[in-house]
Image: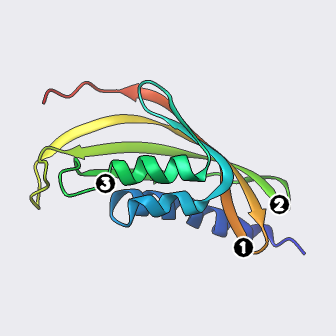
């Protein structure tokens, strides 16, 4: 039986879990939220990471105390099921960066880095929802002086 409200909630939790791990948690563990051959596309040069291990390596490389502090503010996630095991879940993103590196809290706000939409394709494997693909599509980009 497919309980759409419960499965919608679980998909929304997956979206929030990724940005929490990227911002505050163990960044390399973001890869565990993707299927083995998942893809993640983002950034000004449309960087594409293919496969869980490539995703893990990129997040591990971009971790550490000197990493610029950022917060991914995600809203308006709308889950649309293709079937009980596949869903499309666009989410609005506002990316905020702080001006200090390494971060000194509370940090001065550098500004909004950009606003856009995550286009996520999710798949349910066993009892778990995972990202099959995540693509960031920028809507607004602000050049903030350093």
Q: Is residue 48 above or below residue 127?
A: above
Q: Earlier in the sequence, mark 1 or mark 3?
A: 1
Which disc number belongs to residue 63?
3
Q: Is residue 25 above or below residue 63?
A: below
Q: Earlier in the sequence, mark 2 or mark 3?
A: 3
Which disc number belongs to residue 6?
1
Question: Dividing the image into 4 quarters, which one contains the C terminus?
Answer: top left
Element marked by disc 1: helix
Number of residues whose C-alpha sits closer than 10 Å to that of mark 1, classed few (under 14), some (14–19) or many (20 or more):
few
Proximity of marks 2 and 1: CB atoms separated by less than 8 Å: no
Element marked by disc 2: loop
Question: Dividing the image into 4 quarters, which one contains the N terminus?
Answer: bottom right
Q: Nearer the viewer, residue 141 or 18?
A: 18
Number of residues whose C-alpha sits closer than 10 Å to that of mark 3, classed few (under 14), some (14–19) or many (20 or more):
some
Residue that badge 2 annotates: 85
Image coordinates for residue 46, horizontal then vertical, percent: 49, 27
Residue under the image location 29 percent in, 45 percent down: 96
Q: Nearer the viewer, residue 140 or 136?
A: 136
């Amino acid at each position: 039986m497919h309980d759409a409200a419960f499965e919608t909630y679980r998909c929304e939790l997956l979206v929030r879990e990724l940005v929490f791990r990227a911002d505050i948690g163990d960044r390399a563990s973001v890869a565990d939220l993707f299927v083995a051959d998942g893809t993640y596309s983002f950034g000004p040069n449309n960087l594409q990471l293919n496969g869980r291990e490539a995703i893990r390596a990129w997040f591990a490389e971009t971790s550490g105390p000197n990493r610029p502090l950022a917060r991914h503010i995600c809203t308006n996630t709308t889950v649309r099921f293709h079937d009980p095991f596949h869903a499309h879940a666009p989410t609005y993103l506002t990316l905020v960066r702080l001006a200090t590196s390494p971060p000194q809290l509370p940090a001065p706000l550098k500004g909004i880095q950009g606003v856009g939409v995550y286009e996520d394709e999710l798949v349910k494997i066993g009892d778990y929802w995972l990202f099959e693909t995540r693509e960031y599509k920028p809507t607004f980009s602000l050049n903030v002086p350093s």
